Image (cartoon, rainbow, N blue to C red):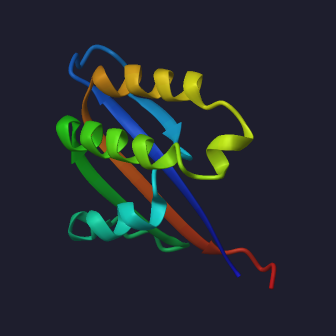
Amino acid sequence: MPARTERIYLFPSNTNEPARMMRFPIWWDRREFFNKFRNREIDTGNPIYVDYAYLLTLGEALVWDKTCRERFTDDSRSQKRDFTVEMQQFELALRKSRWVIVESSEWESGLD
């Protein structure tokens, strides 16, 4: 059975500041993200597992984040706990960014 993980790298406009790595937000629609940005897929060439990167501009990431937040309010996952603080922290970090890279990795977990 394959295992997956997604991370987001936020690169600030100020090149003197460090980049941030964060988990793929739970309110982002994973399936829809990969459908929408499929043409941005870059194979990183990792010989051990499948690893892709997707480059987004700040504008694209902000629009995507807003769209997903609006949809997430109707999702049952949003009812289980309050994600407001996480959403605010993510948006603040996102707004300070110039580039956004989403990394998606998949490997064989051996848990069949």
Residue ranking furthest to the front: 74
Task: Give x and y (percent) for residue 5.
Answer: 58, 58
Could you say which is closer to the camera, residue 78 or residue 54? 78
Residue at horizontal 47 percent and vertical 22 percent from the top: 88
Q: Is residue 84 left or right of residue 82?
A: left
Quarter of the image with the N terminus is bottom right
Could you say which is closer to the camera, residue 65 or residue 40? 65
Residue at horizontal 28 percent and vertical 65 percent from the top: 36
- Picture mark count: 0
Task: Give x and y (percent) for residue 39.
Answer: 21, 70
Residue at horizontal 36 percent and vertical 41 percent from the top: 65
Residue at horizontal 23 percent and vertical 63 percent from the top: 40
Task: Give x and y (percent) for residue 29.
Answer: 46, 57
Q: Quadrant of residue 33?
A: bottom left
Q: Is residue 4 visible?
A: yes
Question: Vertically, is 111 above or below 106?
Answer: below
Task: Give x and y (percent) for residue 47.
Answer: 48, 74
Q: Is residue 84 left or right of residue 13?
A: right
Quarter of the image with the C terminus is bottom right
Could you say which is closer to the camera, residue 36 or residue 10? 36
Q: Is residue 24 visible?
A: no
Q: Is residue 64 left or right of residue 79?
A: left
Q: Quadrant of residue 91?
A: top left
Could you say which is closer to the camera, residue 93 or residue 82? 82
